[in-house]
Amino acid sequence: MNDPSQARLASSLSTVDVVALTVGVVIGASVFETPALVAGNTGSGWAALLAWTLGGGVSIVGALCYAELTTAYPHAGGDYFYFQRAFGDWLAFLFAWARLVVIQTGSIALLAFVFGDYATELWPIGAQYSPSIYAALAVAGLTLLNALGVRQGKHLQRGLTVATIVGLLVLIGAGLFLVPESAGQAAATRASDGGASVGGGGSFGMAMVFVLLTYGGWNEAAYLSAEVRDLPRNMTRGLLGSLGLIAGLYLLVNWAYLQGLGLAGMAGSEVVAADLMRAAFGAPGAKLISLLVVAAALSSTNATIFTGARTSFALGRDFRLFEFLGRWDADTETPANALLVQGAVALGLVGVGAWTRQGFEAMVDYTAPVFWLFFGLAGAALFVLRRIEPETDRPFQVPLYPAVPLLFCAACLYMLWSSVAYAGAGALLGVGVLLAGIPLLALRTARSQETSS
C-alpha cells in the first residue's frame, strides 16, 4: 500500500493544463544556444534534423516511464524519493549530493552563460570574458535577490514563456520566408572565414547530448500527474501532445536556421538566433531577439536557483552532515544557507567555464554524464519498484512494458557513454565531483552506526 503521507492532491488539471505547463517548463533559453552546437557536431542538415527528431522520441519514451512513477508515488522529493524507496538511503544521498554540486549548479551556470552570450551581443563589456562576467553577475545577483526573499511573480514567468514561444515563431518565419539568399550565403562565408567546420571534428552522440539538454525539463513537469483529472487518459494525452508540440517547434526553428544561415553559418555562430534575425531584419532584428533571449535566460536561471536551493534545503533536513543547509530564515522566508552555498558552487563553475573560454559547452560537458547516470537509474527504479511493491496502486502503467522502459534505459546508457566519450575533461571533472560524495556517504554511515550503538 502507498504511504498515507503521499495522498494525492486535488485532481484539477486537464489535458490542456498538462500541455501548457510542460511546454512552459521545457522551452527555455537553451533552445537559442544549442542549435549551433548541434550543427557543429553533424555533417549535414538532414543529420541535424534527425537528431532533433530522435530527441523528441527519447523524451516521449522517458515521459511515459515517469508518468508511472509519479502517479504511483506522488511525492515532493521526486527522483530522490524513488531512489530511496527502490535502492535505499545511500543512492538517495548521492543523488542529493549530485544535485548540489553538479546537476543543479551546473544548470544554473550554463543558463547564466546563455544570458552572458546574448547580453554581450547587446552590451559587450570585455573582449574575451564578457559572457563570463555577465554570467557571474547573473548568478551572484539572482542568488542575493532570492536570499533577500525577492521572488519572481508567476505572471512574469508565464509572460516570458509566451515571449519565448513568440520569439521561436518569429525565427521560424524569418528563416523560412524573409532571409534573402545572399544573406544566408554571406553568413556561411563568414563562418568559413572564421574557421568554422561541420562534420569534421564532431560526433552524432555529442549532438544528441545538446539536443536532449534542450528537451530537458519534462521530468519535472511529470510531477503534475498527482493533480490531473482522469489520470491515465489525460496524462498520456498531455505528455504526448506537449512533447509533440515541442518537437515540432524545434524541428521548424532548426529548419529555419538551415534555410537562413546554412549548416556552416549555424555551426560558426555564437548567437545563432541573433545572426538569423540580423540576416532577415538587420541590426534592429538582432537586438530585438537578443533582448528576448536575455529575459528568457534570466527567467530560467532564477527559476533554477529557486528550485535548486529547496532541494539542498531538503538534503540538510534529511542528513545531519549537511544540517547547515537545512536552516530556514524566518525573516526572509528562504533557505538562505542553501542559496548561498549553491551560489558559491555555481560561481565556481562559471570560473571553470571562463577558464575554458567555452562556458556553455563546458557546463554541458560537466553536467551531462552525472545527469544521464541518474536518469537511467530512475528508469531502473521503475523495474525494481514493480518487483518489490507489486501491491502498489498504479493508475497509469507504461504501455508495452518492459520494452518501453528498457528502451529508455538503453537510451540513457548511450547518452552516458556519449557524454563521457566525446565531452572530454569537463565530463571527467563532473564524475570526479560526484565520486567525492562517496567518502561523505561513508562518514555519514559511520556516524549513523555510532549513534545507533
Image (cartoon, rainbow, N blue to C red):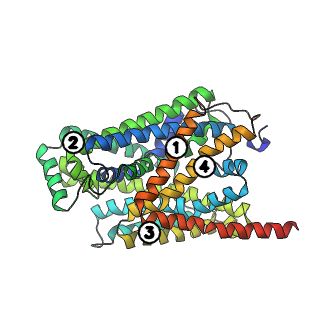
Above or below — where is 15 with respect to 73?
A: above
Q: Residue 36, how many percent across, how many down?
A: 30, 52
Q: Secondary structure at mark 3?
A: helix
The label shown at residue 299 is: none
Residue ID for mark 4: 377
Task: Please name the amino acid that badge 1 sits on.
Answer: Ala
Q: Nearer the viewer, mark 2 or mark 4?
A: 4
* Mark 2 vs 3, N-terminal side: 2
Mark 1 or 2: the one toward you: 1
Alpha carbons under labels 1 and 2: distance apart: 34 Å
* Comes first in the chain, label 2 or label 4: 2
Q: Nearer the viewer, mark 1 or mark 4?
A: 1
Q: Indicate the secondary structure of the residue bearing disc 1.
A: helix
Mark 4 surroundings: few (<14), some (14-19) or many (≥20) residues within 10 A:
many
Q: Residues within 10 Å of mark 3 (few under 14, many from 20)?
A: many
Image position of 449 (left or right of 346)? right
Residue 133 seen: no
Residue type, numbered disc 3: Val
- Residue for badge 3: 350
The one nearer the camera, 176 or 50, is: 50
**Which labelled disc corresponds to residue 410?**
1
Question: Nearer the observer, disc 4 or disc 3?
Answer: 4
**Residue type marked 4:** Leu
x then y, percent, for residue 351? 43, 72
Q: Residue at x 13, y 43 (%)?
A: 181
